Amino acid sequence: MASTTRRLFSLIIGGVMLVVMTACSPLKLLNALTPDATCDKTEGIAYGPDPRQKLDVYVPRPPMKNAPVVVFFYGGSWNSGSRSDYAFVGEALASRGIIAVLADYRLYPQVHYPLFLEDGARAVAWTHEHIRQYSGSPQRLYLMGHSSGAYNVAMLALDPGLLGAVGLSPHNLSGWIGLAGPYDFLPIKNPQVRPVFFWPDSPPRSQPINHVSRGAPPALLIAASDDELVNPARNTGGLARKLREAGVPVQDLYFSRTSHATLVATLSRPMRGLAPVLDVVTAFVKATPTQ
């Protein structure tokens, strides 16, 4: 009975937060409830010449030598989003001894596929080159994203040409983490996403599932079991199966008390009771061997 009550309470809180998140900038609310005593933040670092090519670095307080590093990309269907909206993600990771790098990238209609992926590669290259200045280890480098941001990190981890263009390779990554990511979504149904990928001529090479190969970095794939926006069975489950078939280490986890939107929000302090996403991410980052 008690567990049923807790589950009902969590669902109610999740529903309320989802309404808040879609109606009045819930991300700003989560950020307002996020403490700032756990990390030091350096904002607005340029990794390229465009105004959207900037990133913020969150360093644990006190700093830890050779700390693991996570580069995070947010979602928004490749046509919206700002790194400042996800300060709670930077704080959450830093509070667990992980340096967080939150990067903006160019969006549609300014750019189409694959230019926002090129931005992601440049942000990763900046991190690999400069993170020692923030007590981070470039040998403990992870990528993480939510929704379309999870797509971005999947492509960076699986398509060697993207990091290869900036002098790196997927072998420079210790692992990657996808939250509610679309990894296999052709034909495209979302009208907002179609022009980003040149629908109806969307190239098959745009799909992460088509780039799986032996030797890819270890992956942690997390989804809401009832995600109504990105089908978890086809995307998270399908990619996990293909990675396993290729011999790539992968974990896939599904949480029933979250939605597509609230999955990333569980990293914030007010919503961690919905799912242990931060605990799972922390364990993955701290246990995965370096490449």
Image (spheres, rainbow, N blue to C red):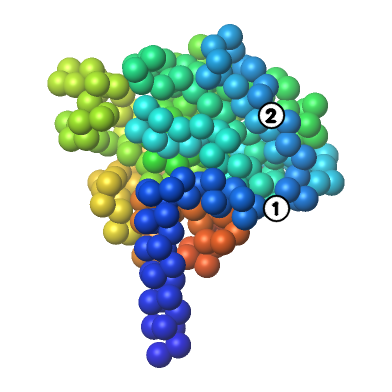
Query: Who is closer to the viewer here, 45 or 289?
Result: 45
Which element type, helix, strand or loop, lies under badge 2?
strand
Amino acid type indicated by mark 1: Pro
Q: Residue at x 49, y 23 (%)?
A: 105
Q: Where is residue 129 shown, x and y percent of the image? A: 70, 20
Specify whether 106 is left or right of 38: left
The answer to whether residue 141 is seen in the rendering is: no
Q: Is residue 211 above or below residue 283?
A: above
Q: Which residue is mark 1?
A: 35
Amino acid type indicated by mark 2: Glu
Q: Which residue is mark 2?
A: 43
Q: Is residue 254 above or below residue 246?
A: below
N-terminal of the pair, mark 1 or mark 2, is 1
- Where, by quadrant of the figure, is residue 142 drawn? top right
The answer to whether residue 146 is seen in the rendering is: yes
Which element type, helix, strand or loop, lies under badge 1?
loop
Q: Are marks 1 and 2 in contact (CB under 8 Å)?
A: no
